[in-house]
Image (spheres, coloured by chain):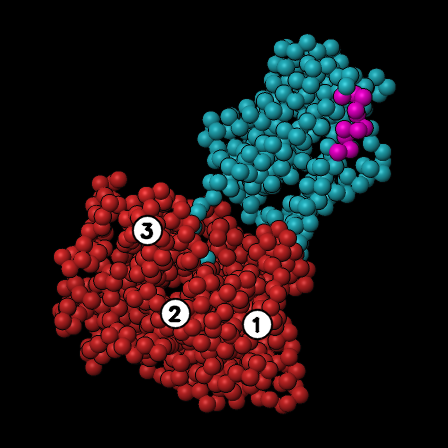
Amino acid sequence: MRERPWTAFYGPGVRASIEAPATRDLPALVRSVAAAHGRAPAFTCCLPNGMNGTLSFAQVDAMSDAFAVHLREVAGLCPGDRVAVQMPNGLAYPVAAFGALKAGCTLVNVNPLYTEGEMARLFEDAAPRALVVADMFAGKVPAATRRHPIPHVVVARVAEFLPALPRAIAGLVQRHWDRTVRPLGWPHVRLPGALASGARRQAEGRIEPARYAGGVEPDDVALLQYTGGTTGAAKGAMLTHRNLLINMEQTLELTTGLEKGREVALTALPLYHIFAFTVNLLGFWALGARNVLIPSPRPLSNLRRAFENYPITWMSGVNTLFNGLCNELWFTDSPPRRLRFSSAGGMALQGGVARRWEEVTGTPVLQGYGLTETSPVLTFNPLGKSREGSIGVPVPSTDILILDDEGRPLPPGEPGEIAARGPQVMKGYWRKPEETAKAMAGGAFRTGDVGVMDPDGYVRIVDRKKDMVIVSGFNVYPNEVEEALSAHPGIAEVAVIGVPDAAAGEAVKAFVVLRDPGLTPEAIRAFARGRLAAYKVPKAVEVRQELPRSNVGKILRKDLRAEAAARAGQGG
Amino acid sequence: MVGPFEQAVLALMIFVIMLGMGASLTPRDFVLTFKRPYAILVGIVAQFGLMPLVGVALVALLPLPAPIAVGLLIMSCMPGGTTSNIFTYFAKGNLALSMLMTVASTVAGVALIPLVLLLTAAALDLAIPRESVVATLVLLLVPALLGMGLRRLDPNAGAVTEVLGSGLAIVFILLLVVTWVPRNWQFLLTTTPATYVAAIGLGASGMALAYLLARLLRFRRVDAQTVSLEIGIQNGPLAIAIVAFTFGEAAQPYMAVPALYALFIVVTATLVTLLFRRFNTAAEQRTPKGLL
């Protein structure tokens, strides 16, 4: 094994290597934590006006058992079948996700912002046999499943499992005020009904849901987490029980000072994002923390009641969230008093934002780094030893290699492609052996990011090798956006790049050559909105006479990026 | 003007509304406002300095008969009313500041109203019904504190009360206008234009000047908006009570401005609130979609 000098920065008592997780698989984690913390509050869903509902560890355990029984006995799913979950944060999410895992199924996280077309492509690839979808996004289901029907659809409310009155008020608002929920004219089951039927079967048939996961091996796929593909089509990263459990432990290990059963965590990031899934859903659960779930953090004032009503001790977020909160008067006026620290991931944390956050809250924000394919955390800044501009040191049992263009390791201080080896690296891409082989060439996962490692192990990101754009923590692949735009008959050519953006870190920008000279940028964006999730829609569209090309005719995104960078440098 | 039953219903509505307003606050909001006592102080000075000056200026500029002018001056010396809190809530202003200003000006008013009237109207022998003052305070403070406590006890109960209170507040405001007009239709027809200008102008120019003053003193925008609504919206019912108490049988002409004011301030304040709210909503941070 290589030497790992960075373990010197780990706090006292921190394990330098974690080869086996504390529990064998995710259902075992859910059960053992529930047994330990029982009636303590596990999840609290806090709506923008402060209406809330709470489920205890024992309740989540029992309800996810009932849901597992429902999936297996009522819906007739088999071990290994995919269960897609498309929901914003809410009490239904852990019940559905844990239930699917307990049933021995593979969970598939689906971004609720996806358009019908994006959903259809994902469903085609993952072929889920069941879908749990939030009512406010369920309107897209018929069109998205036309070619690939999903036999069993369960619909959940955002305010599911809240007390009756708040639930009714939230329902009235959604149906009649903001009209986000409409009646569904197709066959589906409601989540509470599904749980009731599961619980009935459990009682009648003396079913032991614990046995469903009996055949699950630690290296079986627990989660298919989709990430945009370089070729345009999304790829599902196969993350195993072991991947996720170990990564959760690797991350918690570096955040010393956490007390089991005493933390109150704020989850404003969506749980369907891999960072929130591993750190917030699994990590906070394992800690016995009370996890305050925010269905939608937009506008940021939606977080106010959660901060006022609960003594938040830990939160995770992306740069955009920390930056935004520091610009909210109510937040800077009375910053959370019990907060001890925050974790940042998903996108680069800007030095200025980290400093301002520390000024406002008096607590540090620690940056980590990782990718969907690595469950996701690869590196993290140890508490008290954070270095500005650095993504920290590798987490336990993880090796970071810096490779040259031929895939040979480079010495410290030289920039090259970051590659990673560790127990959190995915099994591969779902049904894409060539893509997997390419990403794993040389026995380490190639991240596509360019970084430098100091001799003592701290890593800095200097560039991104892939053309990927990261909009506020979400990956956007230019190919996908280009493909969507080129479907417009009035567009002859299109190239998409990422440009710096104050709020989102990066924003999508499209350069187009028009066939129809009357086409306006606004019309192009409107067209894109119908085909792409909102965060993928170009924020700016620039019309060009021609696009820069290489001598073999390939459009050169890097020239466009250089141009944009030069313009930004001039302050224009 | 209003029967005891209607008065009881109105009081009950204000109670529930203030319960809801209170449920939107935490003790920390008040602590923060106390940390900037400057704002409350400026509020009191503007309330009993700026508004009476506006009153005096309107008397000087408009051809008003003496009793109407006296009514106008009394109106201009009133403390802030409870409705200012409702409007501040809907404008997304600083509700804690608004409440504290109402309380402070109501308490200070007991001493300051006669003093200011002495200066402006030269020795009017006014009787200030203490019950009205006390009623204002009780109807503001008790439910607000209860609402705050309710929220602390159970955030759900607090949130539901807030929803209920704010819904009722809209009904209340509509009710004020809808019941006032038919009741006083004849009065509306016989009132002179100058009286209209005085009644509408007092509130409107009070809000505008208070906003400018607060901005000049470098108040934060939400605080300036709060001060503006607080200063511009006077305690109409208190003025009516004072006039009725003082002039008894002969109160009718003195009542003209307070009564008209009570109607038009609701209209003016609604417009200003919508304006402030739009401004505050537009100034809200936009976060990129990616975060959802």
User: Which disc number belongs to residue A491?
Assistant: 3
User: In the rendered structure, which segment of residues is drawn in magenta?
Assistant: B178-188
Position of residue A110 measured from the top left corner of the image (x, y, whole percent)? 45, 68
Colour given to chain B in the rendered image:
cyan
Residue B187 within the segment the image draws in magenta: yes
Residue A436 within the segment the image draws in magenta: no
Secondary structure under the numbered disc 2 in the rendered image: strand
Label 1 marks which chain's residue?
Answer: A
Colour given to chain A in the rendered image:
red
Tell me the residue that label 1 is attached to.
A154
Label 3 marks which chain's residue?
Answer: A
Query: Same chain for marks 2 and 1?
Result: yes
Cα separation, mark 2 vs mark 1, equals: 21 Å
Q: Main secondary structure of the magenta part?
A: helix
Secondary structure under the numbered disc 3 in the rendered image: strand
Label 2 marks which chain's residue?
Answer: A
**Which quarter of the rendering shows the C terminus of chain A?**
top left
Tell me the residue that label 2 is attached to.
A226
Query: Same chain for marks 2 and 3?
Result: yes
